[in-house]
Image (cartoon, helix red, strand yellow):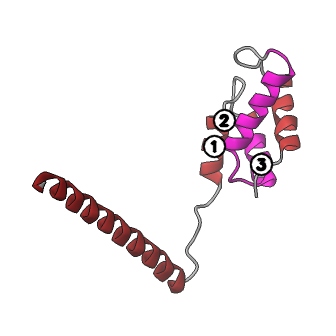
Amino acid sequence: MAITTPLMDEILQHFARVFPMPGRIDGREDYLALVKTWSDQLDPYTDEQVKEACRRLMGKLKRFPYPADLCEELAISTPAPVVDSTSDVVAILALMRTELQEQTQLLATSAFLSTSRCDQ
């Protein structure tokens, strides 16, 4: 599902033709770091979702976008995941219960070890 590096490169090049890039990009290495940063931030989204959000942003922005601009646009247009069935809810609750039990056990062990040290 992650956005591809070639698409991220294409998007940044497109924005750079329209808006001045912020800061100083000193050579190919800096540019590749910028592409990676953007790709990491947009990892949960598909290429199509990112392209559509970029199209909408182009009509709104007055400067080179930051990853946060695109993430905000994606959050507006990308629906939150929907739990499909009762069994999904039960599975999620079971995982949460297991996690809570593990944390409780760790706290109890920690408290026991603390009191054991004090008794010695």
Instruction: Describe the element under mark 3 as helix, strand or loop.
Output: helix
Which contiguous range is marked in magenta? 26-55
Please tell me which residue lies in front, 40 or 14: 40
Q: Quadrant of residue 25?
A: top right
Residue on which the image places disc 1: 71
Q: Earlier in the sequence, mark 3 or mark 1?
A: 3
| Residue at the image position 61 percent from the left and 60 percent from the top | 79
The answer to if 38 sits in the magenta stretch is yes
- Cα separation between marks 1 and 2: 6 Å
> Is 35 situated above or below 64?
below
- Cα separation between marks 3 and 1: 12 Å
Q: Are marks 3 and 1 in contact (CB under 8 Å)?
A: no
Q: Are marks 1 and 2 in contact (CB under 8 Å)?
A: yes
Tell me the kind of residue under disc 1.
Answer: Cys
Q: Earlier in the sequence, mark 3 or mark 2?
A: 3
Residue on which the image places disc 2: 67
Residue on which the image places disc 3: 52
